[in-house]
Image (spheres, rainbow, N blue to C red):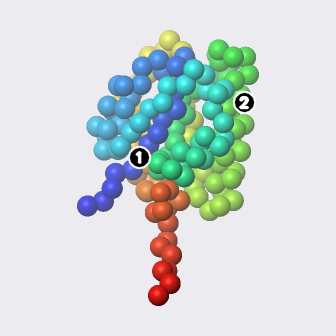
Amino acid sequence: MSKKPEVVVLACQQALPETGPLVEALEGAGLRARAVPEPCSSKIEAFHLLRLLAVEADCVWVLACPEDACLLREGSRRLGKRLEHAREYLREIGLEPERLNLTRLSPGEPVDLTRLATDMADTARTLGLNPGCRGRGPKKEQPQ
């Protein structure tokens, strides 16, 4: 039996105030999912993204406001730079940078959760399980 990919969603509470329906849609699409509400995407650091990949996630998806609609004037722009920094690190260590994703949602606008969940599920399935997560990488030979 193969394992389901796990997606962790970090959701700005301005962009997506209620994360429950998205988690349900992701699980309905065949993924294991967890959503973490964030007060603002500006609070997300590169090391948070990388740690989630190292410890529990096959993909991490950030939902943030558009740069010009961020509650904190430069928060969403800063997040974009941090995300790119983390992706560059993944390239350097040989993991797919696509394991870290960003979708910008306008606060107050309706969100097509089914489409969003389908995009996340397609990406997670294409990438497969994260070999750098929880000892999934190549097994080390044990000394005899």
Q: Position of residue 58 (x, y in %)?
A: 47, 50
Asked whether residue 140 appears in the rendered view, the answer is yes
Q: Nearer the viewer, residue 35 or 117?
A: 35
Examine the rendered structure and indicate whether residue 132 appears above or below residue 56.
below
Q: Which residue is mark 1?
A: 6
Examine the rendered structure and indicate whether residue 123 appears above or below residue 9.
below
Residue at 41% across, 46% down: 6
Decide: few, some or many residues near mark 2? Use Cα within 10 Å; few <14, some 14-19, many ≥20: some
Tag 1: amino acid:
Glu
Q: Position of residue 4 (x, y in %)?
A: 34, 51
- Tell me the CA gap for discs 1 and 2: 26 Å
Tag 2: amino acid:
Arg
Hey, which residue is sitting farthest bottom in the picture? 144
Q: Position of residue 19 (x, y in %)?
A: 42, 25
Residue at 68% across, 53% down: 89
Q: Nearer the viewer, residue 118 or 27?
A: 27
Residue at 50% across, 56% down: 133
Q: Disc number at residue 34? A: none
Is residue 110 shown left or right of residue 89?
Answer: left
Hey, which residue is sitting farthest left in the picture? 1
Q: Which residue is mark 2?
A: 78
